[in-house]
Image (spheres, helix red, strand yellow):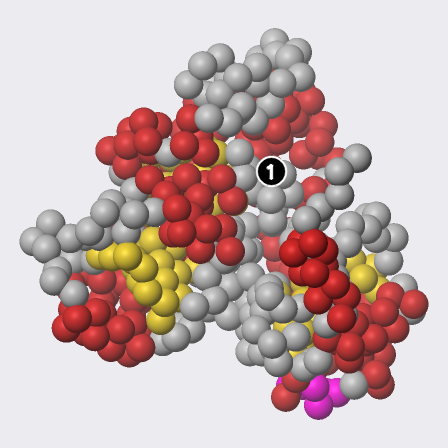
Amino acid sequence: MSTIPDKLHQKLKNRVKDNSLRSLGNTASEVDFTSNDYLGFARNETIFSKTFQSLLNHNIAENGATGSRLLSGNHELYTVLEQKLEKFHDTEAALVFNSGYDANVGFFSAVPQRGDIIFYDEHIHASIRDGIGMSHAKSYKFSHNDLSALQAKIETTHSVLDIEKDTVIYVVTESVFSMDGDIPDLKAFTKFCIAKGYRLIVDEAHAIGVLGKKGEGYVQDLKLQKNIFARIVTFGKAMGAHGAAILGSADLKQYLINFSRSLIYSTGLPPHGVATIISAYTYLEEEGQVERQELADKLKYFKEKVKKLKLEKYFVHSDAAIQSCVVPSNNKVIIVSEKLKDKGFDVKAILPPTVPEGQERLRFCVHSYNAKEEIGLVLELLSRYL
């Protein structure tokens, strides 16, 4: 078998040298402080049973979608799901994609046009960056969660570029950032974009199920949904399933169906996958408040314990389920992660290029099913190792 080129070998050697080489491991048997399954829906037996029953009720026995949604893969459960999403998320239209990555790449590669400009938060998810990279629009990053920095960047850009009359300006952020778990001032960003006529796009991946009165996300919690151009919601985090959807106007949905390549040229989700998302949303609406309250209680306990152990200086401030402990240096953060693993706790070390050099961290994901005793012990061990 042909070997890879030398330049690729060198990149792997550099990762080994930096102690940042990634590898695939087995599902951890340790206490889970790593997964995005914040509410335990991925392991929820009621959701599993209702999914199977739903397939029987719809007389569906197929294993796969058989084609893209524009060919043979748009089975009836897609309609059921999208109508449910429209009602739950108070939006005119919803379009389901195979994953959050597909949704972001499909949106940003298709919607912004040549001559348009995209301003995005510097900590935005890699899938959005990749989509922007495939776009013909110009793009500029602004300092993390800093509205004044965005305003300054826009002013500078206007001074050096000839802005055409039909130029559309897009502003992109997240409601909960995946590495820090911090939250922007969405009210201020929205007010600014409305005043200037800019189109605001918010990725709600880590807010769905966790934030909002019923888990609708942060945008709806602030009652801003009518003022947002597009929201991206994903089902692989708190919803415990797979896939994603773009929420927006009916015209936006129609446009994406016609021009979003990650939708047009991908085989659709299998019926079982779509049925799982439907069941997860039904459970969230009817019974999920129990898990949501458990998560809130465990998160409160986690933060109280951090304060009691005088660990606050290490942690990024966050009121979300993601709690990041910054431990600069690849070697040090990996050592602490491995020591925690030896004690039975799965807490992953996050390394560059996922985070900037000097911002290496342990990313704690708090779950509804984490016992307070587990939280207390893992933080006491962390304190000892730091």
The secondary element bearing badge 1 is classed as loop
Residue 4 showing in the rendered view? yes
**Quarter in which the C terminus is drawn:** bottom right
Count of labels in the image: 1
Residue at image position (41%, 32%) is 261
- Depth check: 165 or 317 in front? 165
Q: Is residue 357 magenta?
A: no
Q: Is residue 108 left or right of residue 212?
A: left
- Depth check: 320 or 385 in front? 385
- Depth check: 184 or 17 in front? 17
Q: Is residue 107 above or below residue 72?
A: below
- Depth check: 125 or 271 in front? 125
For the record, the magenta segment spans 307-312
Residue at image position (28%, 51%) is 137
The 10 Å Cα crowd at callout 1, few under 14, some 14 to 19, many 20 or more, is some
**Residue 356 in picture, x, y percent from top left:** 57, 73
